[in-house]
Image: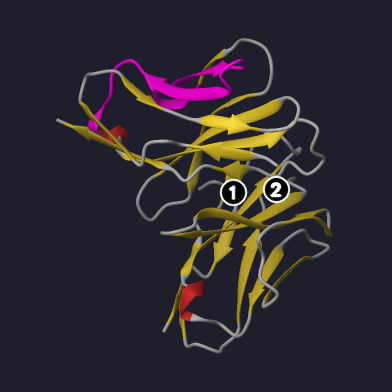
Amino acid sequence: AQSVAQPEDQVNVAEGNPLTVKCTYSVSGNPYLFWYVQYPNRGLQFLLKYITGDNLVKGSYGFEAEFNKSQTSFHLKKPSALVSDSALYFCAVSALVSNTGKLIFGQGTTLQVKP
Amino acid sequence: DSGVTQTPKHLITATGQRVTLRCSPRSGDLSVYWYQQSLDQGLQFLIQYYNGEERAKGNILERFSAQQFPDLHSELNLSSLELGDSALYFCASSRPINYGYTFGSGTRLTVV
């Protein structure tokens, strides 16, 4: 069965510092991996995805994520955090072999960027 | 505007009642997914439809049902509502599958 783990409920970082939001996954076969962001009272917005190819994926708003197959991880990173990055971040996985495209989401990590 | 439209945005109803949530997918998207987001359960996959047919089922209660119509809009029906059904219900659509979703802004259901 597919599963996603986001081990940190909350990540606190100072503005201007680099940030990392962690994600590990479990899936049969090759994964499709995604990061979404949710601002208060809003729907989820797509940040980036890994399908195949380069392990370093660049996405919206300066975010990037690194796919590590041996560690089954897909951590979200940003070199310099902004206060406006404060939000709830979700990692999600879909099995490549799946014919449904169903995404399984992690529990979410709240990112708090302090000025 | 993501292109996925959910109505209503807010719904307050009493226990035991039935409600219908509506979702119009982004133009050209054939797959519609329903998720429930609650504080203690996170984002739970409920059900997926692809071009009118049920494709995958998740942790959807028997009191809940859904369908996708020929014009591709979808409805999620929640009946015999309980306090614990209070949550945000999201619809998402995709084209093609496995390339990620576009989410609607959700329906906040409050059962009193």
Counting every numbered tag in the picture gives 2
Q: In the image, A67: left or right of B9? A: right
Q: Is residue A22 left or right of residue A104?
A: left
**In the image, which residues are magenta?**
A59-83
The residue labelled by disc 1 is B3
Whether pointer 1 and pointer 2 mark residues with C-beta atoms closer than 8 Å, the reply is yes
Percent coordinates x, y for residue A60 in the rendering: 46, 26
At 56% from the left and 88% from the top, the residue drawn is B17
- Mark 2 nearby-residue class (10 Å; few <14, some 14–19, many ≥20): few
Under circle 2, the secondary element is: loop
Q: Position of residue B20 (x, y in %)?
A: 62, 76
Percent of width and height locating residue A30: 73, 24
> From where the camera sits, is residue B108 visible?
no
Residue shown at the point (67%, 78%) measured from the top left: B63
**Above or below — where is B6 with respect to B55?**
below
- Compared to A66, does B21 lie above or below? below
* Rendered-image quadrant of the C terminus of chain B: bottom left
User: Disc 1 to disc 2, how far (Cα)?
Assistant: 7 Å
Q: Nearer the viewer, residue B29 or A2?
A: A2
Of A8 and A99, nearer the camera is A8
Residue drawn where x is 73% and y is 40% of the image? B95
Tell which of B68 and B64 is nearer to you.
B64
Where's residue B85, x and y in %?
51, 73
Q: Residue furthest left?
A: A115
Say the numbered circle drawn on residue B75.
none
The answer to whether marks 1 and 2 sit on the same chain is yes
Q: Which residue is mark 2?
A: B27
Quick check: A90 left or right of B93?
Answer: left
Look at label 2 and name its amino acid. Ser
Which residue type carries mark 1?
Gly
Q: Is residue A3 left or right of residue A81?
A: right
Q: Chain of mark 2?
A: B
